[in-house]
């Protein structure tokens, strides 16, 4: 192992430590710093990122839209704060209310930072996708467990020159959250499958037929434009993240693709949105129960920072106050 902790990750052995080793440490929930060991319980705050057609959470009490300022610029919209059956919730419409922002222009860093500042611990991401498999027809929900990131015009990290960090993305989603989503979804009779790879393309244009066949040859399940770098940034911010990918249609590999009408796609999207609302209402009370710290995400920065303390950029450190405050303030 490297002689200095700040050098961890510069060799193969240290990269293994970054991926595998977790330790207890101070826990940062939003702007509040409280010191907890991994044996102590935390009270989760549930964040929901709504995709196409989802601009609210049904049944929220004490609802209030609030603007949250971040050092990374403006989030997609104000955040909707409220409670559902006593559980604190925060909702963010990914593209903004009315869908004014295209995928490549989303300020992913501001969105995740704003949720972190709001105290969110667990993120459920809802996304409209195209299917790359015959067995995943329109209206099906895929509980994604892997990603292939083919986006290229987006800033993908909170860190950089002045503070370098490498977090593990080997397992990019929270299996604890997926367990709850799968169980509650099946109770509701929603057509879903556990596991699958989400191919993230840049957009805003859809795939060419050659690209669609390429993604299928890689074993991908669905294709969409929004979950990266969202999932990477959530991990850097030590937040638990899971995706429900909602199939609207088959991608263009499918022989029936060209015969699909806009009306048919809109009908599926409306049905998906209704099922997503039912699912969110079912899982929030379960995810909102007190639980131990989840080290896979909530301790992701323990061995991730590479830059020596005396070489860190004060301006960048100030911007990382919410995202990395737990680890930066630990000393």
Image (cartoon, grey):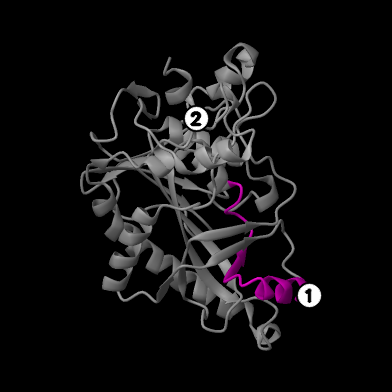
Determine the image quadrant of residue 179.
bottom left
Q: Is residue 16 above or below residue 225?
A: above
Say whether residue 52 is visible. Answer: no
Q: Which residues are magenta?
A: 208-229
Pointer 1: what residue? 210
Query: In this orientation, which residue lies closer to the viewer: 49 or 314?
Result: 314
Task: Identify the mark nearer the N-term, 2 or 1.
Answer: 1
- Residue 88 point in image, percent of width and height: 29, 41
Query: In this orientation, which residue lies closer to the viewer: 287 or 115?
Result: 287
- Residue at 47 percent across and 45 percent down: it is 92
Q: Is residue 244 above or below residue 153?
A: below
Pointer 2: what residue? 323
Say whether residue 45 is visible. Answer: yes
How crowded pointer 1 is (Cα within 10 Å; few <14, some 14-19, many 20+) is rated as: few
In the image, is 310 to the left or to the right of 295?
A: right
Magenta stretch encompasses residue 163: no
Look at the image and tell me in which quarter the C terminus lies. Answer: top left
In the image, is 9 to the left or to the right of 93?
A: right
Magenta stretch encompasses residue 225: yes
- Residue 203 point in image, percent of width and height: 72, 58
Query: In this orientation, which residue lies closer to the viewer: 18 or 300?
Result: 18
């Amino acid at each position: 192992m490297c002689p200095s902790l700040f050098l961890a990750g510069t060799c193969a052995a240290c990269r293994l430590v970054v991926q595998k080793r977790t330790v207890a440490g101070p826990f940062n929930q939003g702007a509040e710093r409280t010191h907890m060991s991994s044996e102590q319980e935390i009270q989760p705050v549930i964040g929901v990122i709504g995709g196409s057609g989802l601009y609210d959470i049904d049944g929220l009490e004490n609802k209030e839209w609030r603007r949250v300022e971040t050092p990374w610029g403006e989030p997609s919209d104000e955040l909707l704060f409220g409670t559902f059956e006593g559980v604190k919730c925060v909702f963010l419409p990914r593209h903004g209310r009315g869908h004014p922002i295209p995928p490549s222009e989303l300020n992913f860093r501001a969105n995740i930072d704003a949720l972190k500042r709001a105290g969110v611990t667990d993120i459920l991401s809802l996304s409209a996708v195209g299917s790359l498999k015959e067995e995943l027809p329109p209206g099906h929900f895929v509980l994604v467990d892997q990603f292939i990131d083919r986006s290229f015009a987006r800033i993908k990290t909170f860190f950089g020159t002045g503070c370098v960090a490498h977090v593990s993305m080997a397992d990019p989603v929270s299996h604890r959250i997926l367990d709850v989503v799968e169980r509650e979804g099946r109770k509701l009779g929603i057509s879903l499958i556990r596991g699958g790879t989400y191919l993230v393309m840049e957009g805003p244009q859809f795939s060419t037929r050659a690209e669609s066949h390429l993604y299928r040859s890689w074993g991908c399940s669905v294709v969409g434009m929004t979950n990266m770098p969202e999932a990477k940034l959530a991990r850097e911010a030590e937040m638990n993240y899971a995706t429900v990918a909602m199939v609207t249609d088959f991608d263009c590999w499918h022989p029936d693709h060209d015969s699909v009408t806009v009306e048919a796609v809109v009908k599926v999207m409306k049905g998906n949105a209704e099922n997503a609302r039912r699912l969110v209402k079912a899982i929030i009370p379960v995810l909102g129960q007190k639980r131990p710290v989840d080290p896979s995400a909530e301790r992701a920065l323990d061995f991730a920072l590479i830059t020596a303390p005396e070489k860190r950029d004060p301006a960048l450190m100030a911007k990382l106050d919410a995202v990395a405050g737990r680890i930066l303030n630990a000393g």
